[in-house]
Image (tube, rainbow, N blue to C red):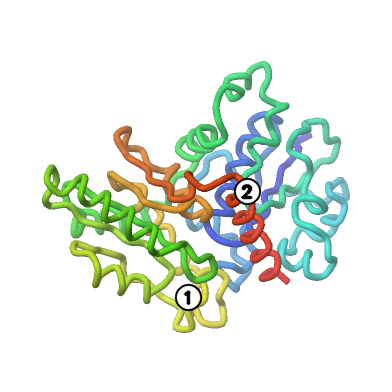
Amino acid sequence: MTQYIVVKGTSGIGNRVFAVATGILYAQLSGRQLVVDWRDGSYSNTGTNLFFRYFDCPMAQSEEVLPVTDSIYPTPWQNQLHRSLGSLINESGLKCYQDLSFDVSRLDYPETIIVLSTYSHKINLMRPLFTGKASRFAAMNHLEILQEILQSNLKLKEDIQLQIEQFKREYFSDYMIAVHIRYSDMKVPLSEVEASLASIIRSVKFKHPNYKIFVATDSQEVLSSFKQKFSNIISTNKWFSTSGKRLHQNPEECQDLIQNGIEALVDLYLLAACDQFLFASRSSFGLLASLLMTNPKAIRHDIDRGKSLIKRVKLSLKNIAKKLNFSR
């Protein structure tokens, strides 16, 4: 009898892709069928499962394959699998991973369906499972594991990939610097980004005089500022919030949620296609782009890497709190 792991989508592209990566690895280790459910409404208000509009993932199936059963864990999901994670949290007051997700460190669940609910990856919690045939993962850090999972199992839909290739042909130069700036609801320090970018430019401009800088940001104001301060800036043509709110989960302003997701994915993979990448890993989107880079000579500059552990933990907790408050 087939058993299933259902990965519920929530929040932005980075958050939900990291959750899927966790689900992929767990499915491989447990032998369960992976089901990805992105019907939550962040990128569609029609109840469409957008994962399969955006990605090809041979091992994943949609929620339509799930049997009608009460054998579901955690139990709050019984008769509620059609619900979004956010709506269940809002109604019940339950906590995301603590109450509405199974424990990824265990494989011995008897239930037919188990549900993964998380705002990010849970790779490190899976380390007790890295034995036997999975022992090779024990020597890898979580970023290496995520990179392997993502690059081996997720592929963009062809029409989205074609948009990326067309942009690269029209606007990329022989040497590309990428910058990601999350600013609407997660204030990356612009002075640090500007100083780091200036340093990168100084290091490459003589060897690569035709360099260009690809900037992906959720703030039109930030993009305009960088175009004034730096030359050779390029960016995609996309929708911005006129109120300065974040781009995802903003149905009040965004007229085309599906296209909003496509624009995010185009930015994501263009960032990953560059030679050097400046980002802040407090943003799951920036971290995800860094893991999708396939150029073995690519250089990554994480402005959060040098921060103290305490400060990084505070930033992480602050960002999680924002997500929880928004979902309520």
Name the one closer to the observer, 53 or 290: 290
| Mark before the other along the chain sequence, 1 or 2 | 1
Instruction: Kindly report which numbered mark, 1 or 2, lies closer to the viewer in this rendering.
Output: 2
Q: Quadrant of residue 233?
A: bottom left
Residue 268 placement (x, y as % from top left): 41, 55
Amino acid under disc 1: Asp
Task: Tell me if mark 2 has few (under 14), some (14-19) or many (20+) residues whose alpha carbon lies within 10 angstroms of its own.
Answer: few
User: Quick check: can you spot residue 266?
Assistant: no
Which element carries disc 1, helix, strand or loop?
loop
Q: Quadrant of residue 60?
A: top right
Which element carries disc 2, helix, strand or loop?
helix
The residue tagged 2 is 310
Q: In the rendered view, does 92 fall on the left or right side of 105? A: right
Amino acid under disc 2: Ile
User: Quick check: can you spot residue 99?
Assistant: yes
Residue 243 placement (x, y as % from top left): 48, 83
Farthest top residue in view: 132
The residue shown at (57%, 39%) is 59
Query: The C terminus is located in which quarter?
Result: bottom right
The residue tagged 1 is 256
The residue shown at (52%, 76%) is 245
Residue 176 placement (x, y as % from top left): 24, 50
Name the one closer to the observer, 137 or 60: 137
